[in-house]
Image (tube, rainbow, N blue to C red):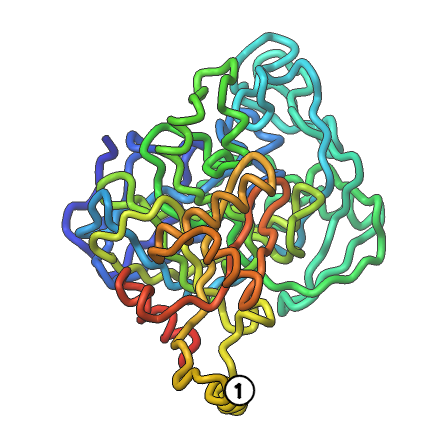
């Protein structure tokens, strides 16, 4: 089982170290942080940098997990996202293609050097461009991924907007890639800015940062990018050492790899505890993303994050429950205004309904190999959480909410107005009131 480096609970735990891409019960934890304490993290980009660094075994580079004092298996941990700040000056991203012969079944977590056959080969950088990452032992081109269409995007000093740049600027940024990425000192990744992609020039976009990875540690060794039902499906029957069967995956994963753009500052994420201490971790900060992350990747950045954690005893949930900031709620899931409630009450009384049901929004995360199975998973989780049937959840999500796509192919949010009584029984009503009661 994971060891905890400091045994006395601390009010604040600072994190600037990373895993080698794996999560699970054997990964050492920092802390513990006190129940009600804070975790402050300097995090590294996820996705592309680790994807071109085959020595990283999980496809991402996430922060070392932190134990929370008093968190036991069968509890949950409420994580308030207090602040997210981008520090990168620029990043690069785009749609990917895999390079055959450079991995054993899975390019994210089972890289192999095509030249010398080494597993998870260490690399060196030679120049810039898509062939700049080389096996340190034999010199072969070692990246398991390249772009089909990519871009380099530079940010303004306030990190409010970004603009994609042309060849000369992209190559100049690549020449000082680590500084422009603001890689944390302990990061092991090759910065993706080295590849200097420039297929799209002059595209402007707003920044609204969020965390692609935020959650608790799984109860079996799982590559970090695969700690979800869609990417995790690649582990079922896999030819490498991280293979799991479908039942094992469902039992052990915690769905910390969300890529839900509502997991941003001001939101509250409630996560399952499947190992002692929970093991709160984060990573894969994104500067911006539309629903679905449809290109497969978005603008991965370095940054700083402040979390506040709180243990919820005896809440054995299987996956995350989200209370987004109010403006991120679907239109129908937003609480009625006073005027709307008065109008609704008048309608009800005309038809013999003397009081309106007291409800508040909740968003239950579902994951699976595809969007249909992810929706089924989210509906089932919501029904179990709130003690109602799946058809009732379907009705409530249809009339007072929505099914939102977090990540294509298989992460969704089942969002709706839930009865406050049901939320109260599970110890969640105070979080909903904190977010929406005003």
Choose between 223 and 193: the one closer to the eye.
223
Q: Quadrant of the C terminus?
A: bottom left
Q: Quadrant of the N terminus?
A: top left
Judge left or right: residue 70 versus residue 359: left
State the image quarter where residue 133 is shown. top right
What x and y, as percent, mark residue 32? 22, 49
Judge left or right: residue 15 versus residue 372: left
Judge left or right: residue 170 versus residue 306: right
Q: Mark 1 = which residue?
A: 347
State the image quarter where residue 118 is shown. top right
Choose between 271 and 50: the one closer to the eye.
271
Determine whether 358 is above or below 396 in the image: below
| Residue 100 seen | yes
Judge left or right: residue 160 versus residue 217: right
Choose between 70 and 137: the one closer to the eye.
70
**Residue occupying image coordinates x 49% and y 70%:** 325
Determine whether 330 is above or below 73 in the image: below
**Residue furthest out toward the left:** 8
**Residue occupying image coordinates x 26% and y 47%:** 67
What x and y, as percent, mark residue 414? 51, 55
| Residue 183 seen | no
The residue carrying pointer 1 sits among few (fewer than 14), some (14 to 19) or many (20 or more) residues within 10 Å by Cα, namely few
What x and y, as percent, mark residue 221? 37, 28
């Amino acid at each position: 089982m994971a060891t905890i480096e400091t045994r006395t609970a601390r009010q604040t735990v600072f994190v600037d170290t990373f895993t080698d891409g794996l999560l699970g019960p054997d990964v050492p934890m920092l802390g513990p942080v006190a129940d009600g304490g804070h975790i402050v993290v300097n995090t590294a980009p996820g996705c592309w940098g680790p994807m071109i660094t085959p020595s990283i075994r999980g496809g991402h580079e996430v922060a070392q997990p932190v134990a929370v004092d008093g968190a036991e298996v069968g509890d949950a941990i409420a994580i308030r996202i207090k602040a997210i700040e981008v520090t990168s000056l620029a990043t690069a991203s785009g749609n990917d293609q895999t390079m055959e012969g450079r991995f054993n079944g899975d390019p994210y977590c089972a890289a192999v050097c095509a030249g010398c056959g080494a597993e998870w080969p260490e690399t060196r950088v030679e120049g810039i461009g898509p062939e700049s990452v080389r096996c340190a032992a034999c010199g072969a081109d070692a990246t398991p991924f390249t772009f089909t269409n990519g871009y380099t995007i530079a940010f303004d000093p306030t990190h409010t907007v970004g603009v994609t740049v042309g060849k000369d600027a992209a190559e100049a940024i690549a020449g000082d890639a680590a500084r422009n990425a603001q890689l944390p000192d302990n990061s092991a990744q090759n910065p993706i800015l080295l590849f200097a992609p420039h297929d799209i020039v002059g595209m402007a976009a707003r920044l609204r940062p969020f965390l692609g990875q935020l959650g608790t540690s799984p109860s079996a060794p799982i590559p970090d990018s695969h700690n979800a039902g869609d990417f995790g499906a690649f582990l079922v029957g896999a030819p490498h050492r991280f293979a799991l069967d479908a039942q094992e995956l469902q039992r052990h994963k915690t769905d910390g790899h969300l890529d839900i753009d509502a997991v941003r500052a001001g939101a509250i994420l409630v996560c399952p505890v499947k190992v002692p201490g929970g093991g709160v971790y984060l990573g894969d900060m994104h500067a911006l993303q539309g629903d679905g992350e449809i290109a497969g990747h978005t603008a991965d950045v370095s940054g700083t994050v402040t979390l506040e954690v709180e243990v919820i005893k005896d809440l054995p949930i299987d996956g995350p429950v989200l209370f987004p900031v109010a403006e991120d709620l679907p239109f129908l899931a937003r609480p009625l205004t006073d005027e709307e409630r008065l109008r609704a009450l008048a309608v009800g009384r005309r038809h013999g309904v003397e009081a309106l049901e007291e409800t508040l929004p909740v968003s239950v995360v579902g994951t699976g190999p595809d969007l249909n199975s992810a929706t089924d998973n989210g509906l089932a989780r919501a029904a179990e959480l709130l003690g109602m049937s799946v058809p009732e959840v379907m009705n409530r999500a249809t009339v007072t909410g929505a099914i939102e796509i977090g990540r294509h192919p298989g992460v969704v949010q089942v969002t709706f107005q839930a009865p406050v009584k049901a939320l109260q029984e599970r110890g969640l009503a105070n979080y909903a009131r904190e977010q929406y009661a005003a």
